[in-house]
Image (spheres, helix red, strand yellow):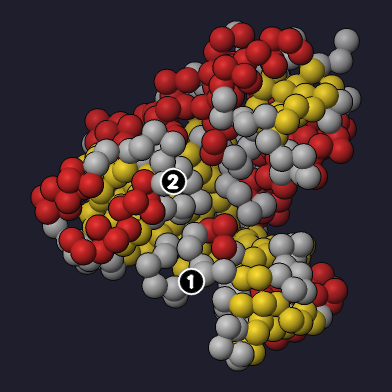
Amino acid sequence: MSKKVMILGAGIGQLRIIEICKEAGYETVIVSREREQPGFKYADHFYLHDVTDHEAMLKIAQAERVDAILSDQLDAAVWPVAYVAEKLGLPGIGSDTAFKFTNKLKMRKEAQRLGINVPQFCGVSSRQEALEAAQTIGYPVIIKPADNSASRGVYPVNNEAELEKYFDASMAYSPTHQLMVEQYIIEKEEYCLQSFCHDYKNTNLVIARRDMFDIPNTFIPSATVFFDADSAQAEIEREILALHNRVVTGFGLKFGMAQGEYYYDKKSNKVYLGEIAARGGAVFISSDIIPLACGVDSSKLLVEYALGMPCLSEPIRLRSGAAGYFCFMLPRGTVIGIKNADKIENITGVYLSFLENVSIGMEIGEARDKTSRKGPVVVYGRCKEDCYAVMDEVKQILQIEVRTPAGEIKGIQW
């Protein structure tokens, strides 16, 4: 009898696990609040619903009598997936563990309990509490929702006037109306790791140092080029890999992908946990970039573990390599020209070029968070340097023109 798998989300980030299920002959139950998503064409049963409504997800799972529930690259689905699995006795990470990975306040407190460095922080639910917390921590600070992702509602704050200015905008992104006021580590390098946890054992897969857009008052990665964890040579890379292992195992993750973001404070020579997530990275990271960079099909492992299959009789082995994504920004205005987009994938080392989020006549707003990015272009090679060399070719070829409100014609910001 065919297995029935429930998948929360039908977007690009979930497409790989949906395809794996269909290739294996499993029946799919797909839930998304948007009908126009690429994953819906693979659904045997689909429901239009908000995936964060955990009780509704439980009712659907019960009615469909599913054998497994999972998601990937979707932070909002981590807790509902864990909740439903727990209620139905299906393989899952447990709702308490999921909460540690999705609520930033709980995340910080759990890290402190494990003796792991985190920026000084305070949870607040009112403007006055935020002002008092910032005064205690000392400006500059960062304010961010305690329960959102993709850098939505995250603002650097240098003084009381700026906190007053951005408080409401940040709070609007918190479903539980909780913010975190946090120490702003200015002179830092940001690292990103991806690992797979199996039977509470963590295996680091890839590591990268992020490039960031130079846009005031934002924290938006422009590129992240990963290489296999076994090839890490720098002392700071090895320290962060060891720290990530401590975090993931200390948080009690039973199985699945884990994405960690870490800050290296060059001034104090300390490493801090930025965030940790019990899911694979978006922007094609877990679905495509990890296999390209280290040869491990983490998406397939996730599906197998969610179905309770004994799939790792031997340790995970990494292949050396590198792969990553490059996004771009466009100036505020109207897109009036796109040239050479069809030539990009002919470049050796380009894996895919996702430009479906740019079109002639599109209105481009002000850059605010990760959702403002366009692309990505995904590239691969033997090492990081190969990836950057491939992108140099892409940047010389791709042209996008935007007419700004002032009537100027401007192009891509990489």
Task: Using the rendered view, name the quadrant where residue 255 is placed.
Answer: top right
The residue mark sitting in front, 2 or 1, is 2
Q: Secondary structure at mark 2?
A: loop
**Residue named by callout 2:** 173
Q: Position of residue 348 (x, y in %)?
A: 79, 72
The amino acid type found where label 2 is placed reads: Tyr
Q: Residue at x 64, y 46 (%)?
A: 286
Using residue 121 as the reference point, say whether residue 239 is left or right of it: right
Q: Secondary structure at mark 1?
A: loop
Task: Using the rendered view, name the quadrant where residue 251 is placed.
Answer: top left
**Residue named by callout 1:** 213
The amino acid type found where label 1 is placed reads: Phe
Q: Position of residue 208 (x, y in %)?
A: 51, 58
Front residue of this view, candidates 201 and 334: 334
Q: Residue furthest bottom?
A: 408
Q: Position of residue 345 (x, y in %)?
A: 82, 70
Question: How far apart are the two marked residues, 2 and 1, measured between alpha carbons?
Answer: 22 Å
Front residue of this view, candidates 120 and 300: 120
